[in-house]
Image (tube, rainbow, N blue to C red):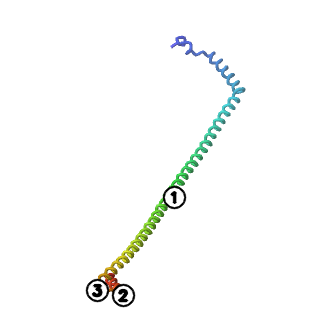
Amino acid sequence: MDMNSLPPFLQVNPGLIFWTLINFSIFAFIIAKFAWKPLKEGLQARENTINEAIANARLANDEAQALLSESKAKITSAQQEMMTIVKNGKVQAEAQIRLATEEAEAVKNQKIKEAQREIERSKDDAIKELRQEVTSLVIDATEKLIGRRLDSEDHKRIIDSSVNELSKN
């Protein structure tokens, strides 16, 4: 293969290589002399801003985590407080129910006692009325049997003996 048969961009020219190296060396020297320090400072500044942004992001993340933990703690505290309030409400409701039940029981017992007293009073009234009725029947029957009127002493003795017999029965 001949060098002339290659396309021009693949042909190697030693003079061109020499001048390319000289130009590159001058370019590298100028860059090193005048641009390298500002480029390095710019890259360093960029690295510093990126590091600061990362540090700020970490700080913000830590603050967010702290706020999240604090919020979770507050939510947990609020839930516990709510459960305590509900529990106290149930206890108070049960106490109110128990108190109302006791009061109702007391009222019921009082009404029963009043009813029993009323029954006793009615019974006593009925017994008195029955005694009077029995007394009048005994007096009438005695007068018919004996054929005469008895004095109050005789009446009293007969009545007491009749009532005592009825009471026993």
Q: Is residue 150 left or right of residue 86?
A: left
Residue sitting farthest toward the right: 34
Q: Amino acid at mark 2?
A: Asp
79 up-or-down from 52: above or below: below
Q: What percent of the width, then of the height, locates residue 154? A: 35, 88
Q: CA distance from mark 1 to mark 2?
A: 80 Å
Asked whether the residues under the numbered discs 1 and 2 touch, taking CB atoms below 8 Å apart as contact, a structural biologist would say no
Type of amino acid at the residue the image marks with label 3 = Gly
Q: Camera-side residue: 51 or 160?
A: 160
At label 1, the amino acid type is: Asn
Q: Are marks 2 and 3 in contact (CB under 8 Å)?
A: no
User: Closest to the observer: 84 or 15?
Assistant: 84
Q: Which mark is residue 147?
A: 3
**Structural distance between the alpha carbons of marks 1 and 3:** 86 Å
Give the number of the disc on residue 151.
2
Q: Circle 1 is placed at which residue position?
A: 88
